[in-house]
Image: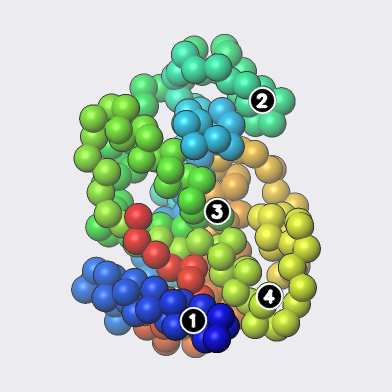
Amino acid sequence: MTDLISTLQRTARRIFKTHLLPPQWHNLAIGELPLLAVDLELTSLERDANIVSFGWVCCERQKIRMESAFHEVIKTEADLQQSPTIHGITNQDVTQGKDLRPILTRLLQYAETHIWVFHNALLDTNALKNACRTLDIDFPEFTYFDTLQMARYLLLKKQHPIGPKDLTLVNCRKRYGLGNINAHNALSDAMATMELALLQLHEFSPKGSEPLHQLIRTEAVSIS
């Protein structure tokens, strides 16, 4: 009975999310999706973490647009905690960094034009919401694809046991034969996430003809 209830609950969530998809995305073929891979470097993994750098890149019709690549360090007075060790971003870097508001405003312009791509969307969307709240900026609704959740779905579909590190960006890429990345640089991670997303989407829909709403069952597509 418990399994039946869980199945019904998952089905209900998928149906609910399907109806929430904006009309312009609902039936658009996966191979035609305009994508925006986004990565944030944060002061910590806590819910109140501050953003110390942005990285993003666009992809149109399954081709990464290198001219769209963006990276910037953010000026902040927040405690950097482990950022100098993990990200290589120092106090001097953030002192010379850019103001958060114009960069955040620039990023949010993609909310209606692209499907955003994250690896672990919950972490980055929470940071974006907190930043908008601090700056009194309206946080827009956008549709996103989470490569971490897609990896989980694909492994479970193959009845592959999921180990503690199987869902990291590095190990998800290794399963597709992708090379090493300059980890913990926001732009490098955004590029790496986009490459992973394209291969995951190809695995799900080799011809790219499946409509976006078919991805709902993977629980990798959601609304911010």
Please give left or right for residue 26 compared with residue 218 in the image: left
Residue at the disc numbered 4:
155
Q: Secondary structure at mark 2?
A: loop
Q: Answer yes or no: do the residues labelled 4 and 2 have beta carbons within 8 Å? A: no
Residue at the disc numbered 2:
82
Mark sitting on residue 171 = none
State which tag comes first along the sequence, 1 or 3. 1
Q: Position of residue 180 (x, y in %)?
A: 75, 52
Q: Secondary structure at mark 3?
A: loop
Q: Is residue 114 above or below residue 43?
A: below
Residue at the disc numbered 3:
120
Residue type of the residue flagged with mark 2: Gln
Farthest-out residue, front: 1
Give the image quarter of residue 104: top left
Please give left or right for residue 126 compared with residue 94 in the image: left
Q: Residue at x 30, y 81 (%)?
A: 27
State which tag comes first along the sequence, 4 or 1. 1
Q: Quadrant of the N terminus?
A: bottom right
